[in-house]
Amino acid sequence: MMEVHVLASGSDGNCTVVECDGEAVVVDAGLSCRTLMSYMDREGVDSKMIKAILVTHEHADHVKGVGPMARRLNVPVMCTLGTFQSSQMGAVEYIPYDLRDCFSVGPFRVVPLPTYHDAAEPNAFFIETDKGKLAMVTDTGKFDYRIEHALKSCDAAVVEANYDLEMLHNGPYPPSLQRRIEGDHGHMWNRDTGMALKRTMSDARKIFLAHLSRTNNEPDVARETVADITGVRRLKIDCLEFQGDTRTFKVKGRRRPPSRCLSGPRPSSSAWSRRPPSGACSPSQARRTPAGLPAP
Ligand SMILES: [Zn+2]
Ligand SMILES: [Zn+2]
């Protein structure tokens, strides 16, 4: 069984645990380690399952608790070199990946998807197991064909709906910040997310709206906009409702052959099960590195 535990989502902090058959990865840890551990308890996540922390980019709402959590759980941090060098995680076991390669961690086959965001080397993730496929796409000013392919291929999409345009324009943010958020390297607004979900429509796909702005969006506004555009019933579109809210849902895979790797050469389905694709690394290959330095 594949389960997703959304522990935090939004500019105050982001953290999601993806679990499958007793193993798990954390995607981002943008709150204090102590808070996130208490949210894990609440959602029934056994932290001993966690094999690695994957990091999308270096903004504080994604990395604040990464170093402390990696040290406390004694697990490696996996991110691009650009993200690692732009973050201050302290002494952690660091495993780099390249945006052009898929890699494996335990039962998870991970495809990094480059995003369009004002960060050094940001990416989203497509995470696949034998039980289901998950797209996690936030902190991007636009969706390209690879991101839309991930949205189309997945059984569950945790996808950014950061702001309502009218609320942004009528809200307290200064014009320069509004332009940054609206720009091609900012965040997604409800309408464009709805349009992308419509273009990539899949009846069985679960939709979880993520990274909602507390200032420029409301859960009901985001849900309603996406529901109106896609025709998906509002009740079937989920998101966190308030600060401190957490959520667990199952990813229910449909029977079909494994999806092709969204970046790099296509591995055969047996290749996935026999060995990780080229360029892959696993926590067992990790090298301990001095504070702040990538592995040589
Ligand atoms: Zn963010
Ligand atoms: Zn960001």
Image (cartoon, grey):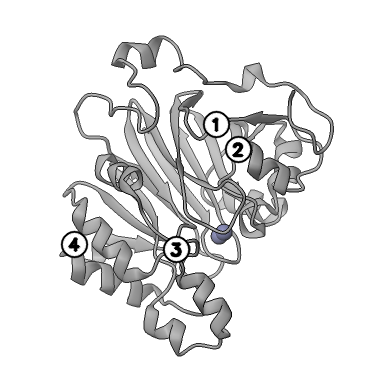
Q: Which residue is mark 2?
A: 80
**Rounded to the nearest whole Å, what is the CA distance between mark 4 and mark 1?**
35 Å
Q: Who is closer to the viewer here, 14 or 292?
A: 292
Secondary structure beneath dot 2 equals: loop
Q: Can you say whether 201 is above or below 113 in the image?
A: below
Say what amino acid the circle numbered 4 marks.
Answer: Val
Q: Earlier in the sequence, mark 2 or mark 4?
A: 2
Q: Earlier in the sequence, mark 3 or mark 2?
A: 2
Q: Could you tell me residue 87's position as x and y percent?
A: 72, 48
Say what amino acid the circle numbered 1 marks.
Answer: Asp
Secondary structure beneath dot 4 equals: loop
**Rounded to the nearest whole Å, what is the CA distance between mark 3 and mark 1?**
23 Å
Q: Who is closer to the viewer here, 106 or 229?
A: 229
Q: Earlier in the sequence, mark 4 or mark 1?
A: 1
Viewer-nearest of labels 4 and 1? Answer: 1
Residue extending farthest to the right is 290
Residue 184 shows which numbered tag?
3
Viewer-nearest of labels 4 and 3? Answer: 3
Q: Which residue is mark 4?
A: 232
Q: Could you tell me residue 33's position as x and y percent?
A: 70, 50
Q: Are marks 2 and 1 in contact (CB under 8 Å)?
A: yes
Q: Which residue is mark 1?
A: 98
